Image (cartoon, rainbow, N blue to C red):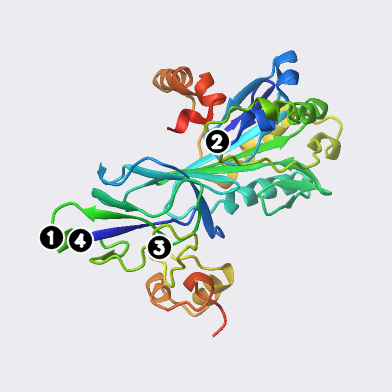
Amino acid sequence: MATFEIKMPKLGESITEGTIMTWSVKAGDVINEDDILFEVSTAKVSAEIPSPVAGKILQILFKEGDTVSVGTVVAIVQLEGDSEEETPEVGESTTAKEEAPASSAEPVKNVKSEEARWYSPIVLQIAQEAQLSKEELDSIPGTGYEGRLSKKI
Amino acid sequence: MLWQNEPSVIIGKHQNVWAEVNMDFVRDHRIKVVRRYSGGGAVYHDAGNLNFTFIENSDNADFNKYLIQIQKFLREIGINAEADERRGLNIDGLKISGSAQCIHKKRVMYHATLLYSTDLLSLNAALTSLPTQQNDVTSPRLLYVKSVRSPVTNIKEYVPDNMQISNLKELIMNYFLKNETNNKIYIFSEKDLSAIKQLSRNKYSTSDWNFNASYLK
């Protein structure tokens, strides 16, 4: 059974966490790609988060009111169909739930966050001077906060 | 978009109106209270205030770029405004502009106010909720975003005496048309206006949306 981890997205530059205000889905719900799953709020940003995949909600790992770090798995979706080919390229798909924090209040810190990684202006400047492409930059493992790339070696 | 409102209090999406607004004052002065779609805290609008809205498609919102654009514009008219960590703009520590953001799927929106000649006494009175109101709250929700109060000032104090808000609007429009070559003046079509009116009728002018925070469920 192929599953997909829904993670707390990054709501703009420099945002490291968000509060889950409402869930639009519950465990057992069948969802289409792009359906709104939950709403997140930071001090200034309000965001409705769509599902990148179609399937069935297996588990919701945080409740409304929980503040969660960017990159933390907040829900698990059972992907539609059985084929591995349907696994989307973006995001990580796992066949086992390894780091489900259940009701733990301790947010799971992801070492490497997927999708668009955040780079500080200084890192981007160094990369530009070194003529590194976005892909090359993405492939460098980060040593900074939440796996971010740091200018330090 | 550059736009204005009649005297009104605009609260953030996840705010509790009773905790943010002096309900007696807004009722007595016929000030409307409206909940917006973006996050952040409560603001006061009147004909002395200008509002910016930027909407774009983006996978990775960089909200600071809008803040910087407004800051650059102000510098061009001789106003040195400092940005703060809440994406507000201040002159000598007094706030002249506040902002709020929202993301809907791939669509990002950035709102900002700009105080030019707003009635600051009304602003402060309307945005000071009465302690007794807190007892009236029969809250369906526990989660609210609380406003961060800031001392404010008007830009009018910092520009030549003969400058009117209409001049400022013109300068803003010219600045954004000149610096963003993709920008063009757009006039709402009949179809747009009809969709806007329908949205207003069904959502934004309803007391369920504006006062009851149960709208999300």
Alpha carbon distance from label 3 to label 4: 19 Å
Earlier sequence position, callout 3 versus callout 4: 4
Left or right of A38: which side holds A97?
Answer: left
Tag 2 residue: B13
Q: Of tags 2 and 4, which is closer to the observer?
A: 4
Mark-to-mark CA distance, 4 and 1 = 8 Å
Q: Chain of mark 4?
A: A
Q: Nearer the viewer, mark 2 or mark 3?
A: 3
Q: For the residues tagged 2 and 3, is the chain the same?
A: no
Which numbered disc covers residue B11?
Answer: none
Q: Residue at image x 70%, y 15%?
A: B27
C-beta proximity under 8 Å, tags 2 and 4: no
Name which residue type carries label 2. Answer: Lys
Under tag 4, what secondary structure? loop
Toward the viewer: B57 or A95? Answer: A95
Distance from disc 2 to disc 1, alpha carbons, whole Å, reads 41 Å
Quadrant in which residue A138 is drawn: bottom left
| Residue that carries the numbered disc 4 in the rendered image | A2
User: To which residue does mark 1 refer?
Assistant: A83
Q: Give residue B124's quadrant in the image.
A: top right
Visible residue check, residue A50: yes
In the shown orientation, is residue B125 left or right of residue A150? right
Give me the chain letter of mark 2.
Answer: B
The residue lying at 54 percent from left, 60 percent from top is A16
User: Contact, CB < 8 Å: mark 4 with mark 1?
Assistant: yes
Co-location on one chain, circles 2 and 1 = no
Disc 2 element: loop
- In this rendering, the label closer to the viewer, 3 or 4: 3
Of the residues tagged 1 and 3, which is closer to the observer?
Answer: 3
Q: Residues within 10 Å of mark 4 (few under 14, many from 20)?
A: some
